[in-house]
Amino acid sequence: MNFIEKLFLGRALKMLRNWIRKNTGTTVLGICMILGAVGNAGTALLDDDPMTVFDWKVTSAAVAIGYGFIKTRQQDQHETDEAENRRLIQ
């Protein structure tokens, strides 16, 4: 890995760590939701049972909901940001 790749990876990991620290509950819930959807889809696609039916609608909905949970900010984070914004305005 060259310097630029290490720098980019380091910054990306730092951003991810800060994001998870702020919104731990919703981020973990979103990651679990996405992993569950992908795991369920993988099981349906890769097993040898012809009776197993893969449903794109359910998988895409679960991934979208998981993404929504990851991007959601918790109420305490809103209150902290609001207090900081009030401090900056005054």
Image: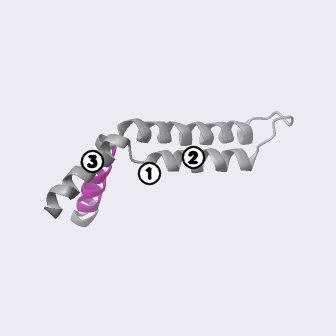
Q: Is residue 53 left or right of residue 36?
A: right
Q: Residue furthest right?
A: 51
Q: Residues within 10 Å of mark 3 (few under 14, many from 20)?
A: few
Q: How is the image coloured?
A: one colour
Give the image quarter of residue 26.
Answer: top left
Residue corresponding to mark 1: 71
* Distance from the alpha carbon under mark 1 to that under mark 3: 13 Å
**Rendered location of residue 86, percent (x, y):** 20, 56
**Rendered location of residue 59, percent (x, y):** 67, 45
Residue corresponding to mark 3: 18
Q: Residue furthest bottom?
A: 4
Q: Which residue sits at x=27%, y=52%?
A: 82
- Judging depth in this view, the residue of 36 and 47 nearest the camera is 36
User: Quick check: marks 1 and 3 in contact, CB under 8 Å?
Assistant: no
Query: What amino acid is labelled 3 in the image?
Result: Asn
**Rendered location of residue 61, percent (x, y):** 65, 48
Query: What amino acid is labelled 2 in the image?
Result: Ile
Q: Residues within 10 Å of mark 2 (few under 14, many from 20)?
A: some
State the extent of the magenta-drawn residues as a range. Answer: 6-20
Residue corresponding to mark 2: 65
Mark 1 vs 3, N-terminal side:
3
- What secondary structure is marked by label 1? helix
Taking the magenta stretch, the answer to whether it contains residue 71 is no
Mark 1 vs 2, N-terminal side:
2
Q: Residues within 10 Å of mark 1 (few under 14, many from 20)?
A: some
Mark 2 vs 3, N-terminal side:
3
